[in-house]
Image (cartoon, rainbow, N blue to C red):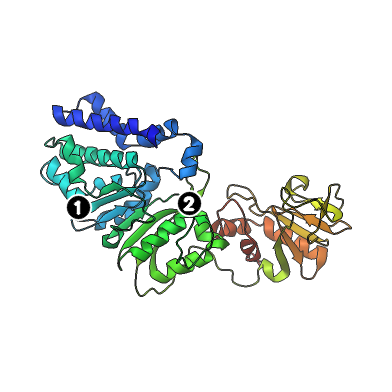
Amino acid sequence: MEEYQSYSKKVRDLLKEILQEKKISDNRLTSIHHILNGESKSVLEKVVSPSSLKKDGVFFTGEKYAHQLVEPILGEINKKSKIIDINCGTADLLLPLTKVLPIESDLKSTLKLWGNILFGQDIHEPFVDLAKSRIAFSALMRTKSFNLSISEVDSLLPNFFATDSLTDHGNVKDASHIILNPPFTKGIPPLDCQWANGKVNSAAIYFENCIRSAQSGTRVIAILPEVLRSGSLYENWRQVISSQTDEVRIELLGQFSKSVDIDVFILDVLKTEDSKAKNRWNIPITEGQKVGDYFDVSIGKVVEYRDPKQGLLSDFIKPKSVPAWSTITKISSKRKFQGSLIEPPFVVVRRTSRKEERFRATASIVNSDSPVAVENHFIVLKAKEGGLKRCHELFEVLQNKTTNDWLNQRIRCRHLTKNSVQNIPWDLQ
């Protein structure tokens, strides 16, 4: 993040000048307002390429979600609190707390007090430097005091430093509150991981590390990608988290930002040594009959870019070639394929799905004469009995608004899962 260093230095230089001159002009007041309210995010997106940000998983939280994350704890913070953000960035999550933290009679005493309450870690040093400057600016605005030199800022905020929080858990064990917006990139879990093998979403690793390292009674609050709440690959992760925590709050937020097309949620838990394991993750439970009772559900077997074109020449379908909510009786596209074919009639549901769409489970019926090779962007539903009649009944279920509402609660990822479709309620009111 060398490109960001100059902005961090510019902010620090402004702080230095104001402390030396012991006054704030109108122009500088405007500058401070921008520094404390979103400028760090907009500058980051201008000076660092989107590909670099995505690679490093660097996406600042922003004011809206930061406030939603910390608002429930504002009333319980006091001089004895120890609040750590293990992926602090430029302190987006910590700044809302500085509006309610107790203050002393002057800037220096206030910043010393805050330095014992606030802890911040990030792997990028320019972010940490800017985080300290922003917290100092917040203290300055609340105390209207200038009795501080720029060289004292670092010593008064000793618990802010650059480190890799995946391996450095030092301050976590002493925290009363842990807050985080971790990277959503892929990472490798530790060797003793109980819930995964191979690469997984790094956010799951960061959060589980916090739970494992925290003392009983610590409140842990995070913005996490939706896949951790509802994805079938993270079922074991959810069980591990549930076994060590009591649920406080789960809040579905929607898309992270205009530039980050990932749905997120807030997970707010208490670490406990005697968990009742009641975390339900806001995932609705199907009572009564469900789609999986009437259909065998699978994922299409053809991976178009990878599977060799060998074997029988067969009818072949993929989402672009199949009109939505239609019954296909003739298939013109062909492909050689060595894997399993599906005997019509059956229903295909597009895996790519967004909560904003009119239908979360957009379907088509295939009722052609020959077995079909199905591309893996389809979920395939083959009636256990009832054939074509049952397929039309499924159409009615999938087009029902109640199904849309159920799926929007069950899974907000951009891809439906086999499990989510199997559990769609069959008898809808």
Which residue is found at the position 11% from the left and 36% from the top? 147
Disc 1, SS: helix
The answer to whether residue 218 of the structure is visible from this angle is yes
Quadrant assignment for the N terminus: top left
Residue 14: horizontal and vertical position, in percent? 24, 29
Q: Amino acid at mark 2?
A: Val
- The residue sitting at the front extreme is 191
Crowd around label 2: few <14 · some 14–19 · many ≥20 (10 Å): many
**Displayed quadrant of residue 37:** top left
State left or right for residue 90 relative to residue 104: right
| Vertical order, 193 against 9 (above or below) | below
Judged by depth in the image, the label closer to the viewer, 2 or 1, is: 1
Crowd around label 1: few <14 · some 14–19 · many ≥20 (10 Å): some
- The residue sitting at the right extreme is 369
> Is disc 2 in contact with disc 1, using a CB cutoff of under 8 Å?
no
User: Residue 116, labelled with which disc?
Assistant: 1
Q: Amino acid at mark 1?
A: Asn
Cα separation between marks 2 and 1: 31 Å
Which residue is found at the position 51% from the left and 50% from the top? 263
User: Residue 264, labelled with which disc?
Assistant: 2
Residue 97: horizontal and vertical position, in percent? 27, 48
